[in-house]
Image: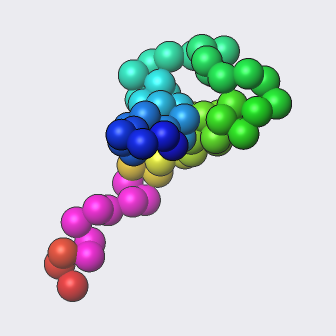
Amino acid sequence: MSEGATASDSPFIKGRNARLYGKQPDNNPYAEGSEDHQAWAQAYDEAADDRQEQDSGIVDPQASART
C-alpha cells in the first residue's frame, strides 16, 4: 500500500466488502492475473465461507469470552 493508505484500501478488504454488500464476483476492479485481483477474489470467496459458518451456527464469536 502507498503512504497514507489504510487497511480498508487493500484489495483484500475491498473484496470482502464487495461480497458482504452483495456485489458479484465479476465486479473485481483489478486486472486479471494481478496480485490485487487474486487478493480481491480470495477475500470475496472467504467472506462467503464466513457467512455460511455463521448462518449454520458453527462459529460462535462469543465463545472465547465465556471461557
Residue 48 lies in magenta, yes or no? Answer: no
Which one is nearer the viewer's eye here, 40 or 44?
Answer: 40
Which one is nearer the viewer's eye here, 6 or 44?
Answer: 6
Q: Write the residue at 66% across / 23% down.
A: 30
Q: Write the residue at 43% across / 34% down.
A: 9
Judge whether residue 38 can be spotted in this image.
Answer: no
Q: Is residue 33 above or below residue 7?
A: above
- The residue lying furthest to the right in this view is 33
In the image, residue 43 lies at what x, y percent?
Answer: 56, 41
Q: Is residue 38 above or below residue 58?
A: above
Residue 32 placement, left or right of 2: right
Q: Quadrant of the C terminus?
A: bottom left
In the image, residue 17 lies at what x, y percent?
Answer: 42, 31
In the image, residue 35 lies at what x, y percent?
Answer: 72, 39
Judge whether residue 57 can be spotted in this image.
Answer: yes
Residue 62 lies in magenta, yes or no? Answer: yes
Residue 33 placement, left or right of 45: right
Q: Quadrant of residue 20?
A: top left
Q: Is residue 25 above or below residue 62?
A: above
Task: Specify how the rendered protein is coloured.
Answer: rainbow
Q: Write the residue at 39% across / 22% down.
A: 21
Q: Is residue 35 above or below residue 37?
A: below
- The part of the chain drawn in magenta is 57-64
- The residue lying furthest to the left in this view is 66
In the image, residue 18 lies at what x, y percent?
Answer: 47, 25
Query: Total number of numbered labels?
Result: 0
Which one is nearer the viewer's eye here, 56 or 64?
Answer: 64
Q: Write the residue at 82% across / 30% down.
A: 33
Q: Main secondary structure of the magenta part?
A: loop
Which one is nearer the viewer's eye here, 41 or 46?
Answer: 41
